[in-house]
């Protein structure tokens, strides 16, 4: 079974630009979660999508947004980029079944975003 | 919300020794605690996990213990090998109603020296 794929792997942008990152989950997985990883803040939850709907959201400004398509692929968008947005953006997929039991998340390799 | 603290931030051991990484969490509703290993240039990989109804779990050289009363859990790696060198993250999961997301610790850089 293919793992989680993320494209592109590396991106360089300048302040003020916007960027779109893509994530393809494991086949059969319906939930995609996005995380930002930085040396200073560690791994922080951005949002989760399930069946094309945002199901949960972290504490990030509205410049960070996402969406999910009917095939479960997901994109996240960051508008008006700031220097502090430089980070590794990770996506994780899971079955996404509802309830109190945890659904194991499988991470992709990430997209390294550098904002100049 | 949940807060997960992880110690130490760096850990250096000799090959063959044991390594222990400790985490504490704040939300008593958290009921699932995974540990991830992240190698350079890769995403985190789940190595072991434990649910709140279990006190200890072992998988070959890796074990995890959970103390719900004290709200802390630990990762134990025995007979460490150079390939164990990586960054390790603990995390806590809050079920629906408490966030439905993973909150991660800040990571431990483990270095296994020959």
Image: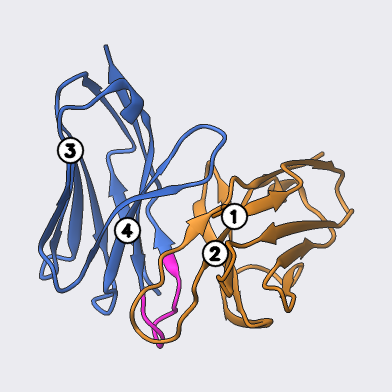
**Distance in Å between CA atoms under marks 4 and 3:** 16 Å
Q: Colour of chain B?
A: blue
**Distance in Å between CA atoms under marks 1 and 2:** 7 Å
Q: What kind of element bears circle 1?
A: loop
- Where does the image place residue A60, in percent across and percent down from the top left? 63, 68
Residue at image mark 3: B61
**Distance in Å between CA atoms under marks 1 and 4:** 19 Å
Which residue appears at 45% of the width and 72% of the height?
A: B101
**Distance in Å between CA atoms under marks 3 and 2:** 27 Å
The image's mark for residue B6 is none
Pointer 3 chain: B
Residue at image mark 2: A93
- Where does the image place residue A44, in percent across and percent down from the top left? 52, 59
Pointer 1 chain: A
Which residue appears at 78% of the width and 52% of the height?
A: A82
The image's mark for residue B34 is 4
Residue at image mark 1: A4
Q: Is residue A89 above or below residue B1?
A: above
Q: What kind of element bears circle 4?
A: strand
Is-magenta flag for residue A12? no
Tag 1–tag 4 contact (CB < 8 Å): no
Chain in orange in the render: A
Q: Quadrant of the C terminus of chain A?
A: top right
Which residue appears at 88% of the width and 54% of the height?
A: A16
Same subunit, labels 1 and 2: the answer reads yes
Q: Is residue B39 above or below residue B101?
A: above
Tag 1–tag 3 contact (CB < 8 Å): no
Is-magenta flag for residue B99? yes
Same subunit, labels 4 and 2: the answer reads no
Same subunit, labels 1 and 4: the answer reads no
Its colouring scheme is by chain
- Where does the image place residue B111, in percent across and percent down from the top left? 33, 24
């Amino acid at each position: 079974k293919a793992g989680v794929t993320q494209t592109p792997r590396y991106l360089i942008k300048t302040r003020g630009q916007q960027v779109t990152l893509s994530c393809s989950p494991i086949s059969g997985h319906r939930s995609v979660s996005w995380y930002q990883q930085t040396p200073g803040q560690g791994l922080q939850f951005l949002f989760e999508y399930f069946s094309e709907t945002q199901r949960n959201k972290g504490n990030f400004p509205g410049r960070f947004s996402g969406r999910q398509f009917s095939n479960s692929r997901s994109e996240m968008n960051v508008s008006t980029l700031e220097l502090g947005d430089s980070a590794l953006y990770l996506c994780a997929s899971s079955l996404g079944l509802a309830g109190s039991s945890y659904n194991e998340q499988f991470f992709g390799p990430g997209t390294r975003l550098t904002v100049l | 919300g949940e807060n997960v603290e992880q110690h130490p931030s760096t850990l250096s051991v000799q090959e063959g020794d044991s390594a222990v990484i400790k985490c504490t969490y704040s939300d008593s509703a958290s009921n699932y605690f995974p540990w991830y290993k992240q190698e350079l240039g890769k995403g985190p990989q789940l190595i072991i996990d434990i649910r709140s109804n279990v006190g200890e779990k072992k998988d070959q050289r890796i074990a995890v213990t959970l103390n719900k009363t004290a709200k802390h859990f630990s990762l134990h790696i025995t007979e460490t090998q150079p390939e164990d060198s990586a960054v390790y993250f603990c995390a806590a999961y809050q079920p629906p109603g408490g966030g439905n997301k993973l909150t991660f610790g800040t990571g431990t850089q483990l270095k296994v020296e020959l």
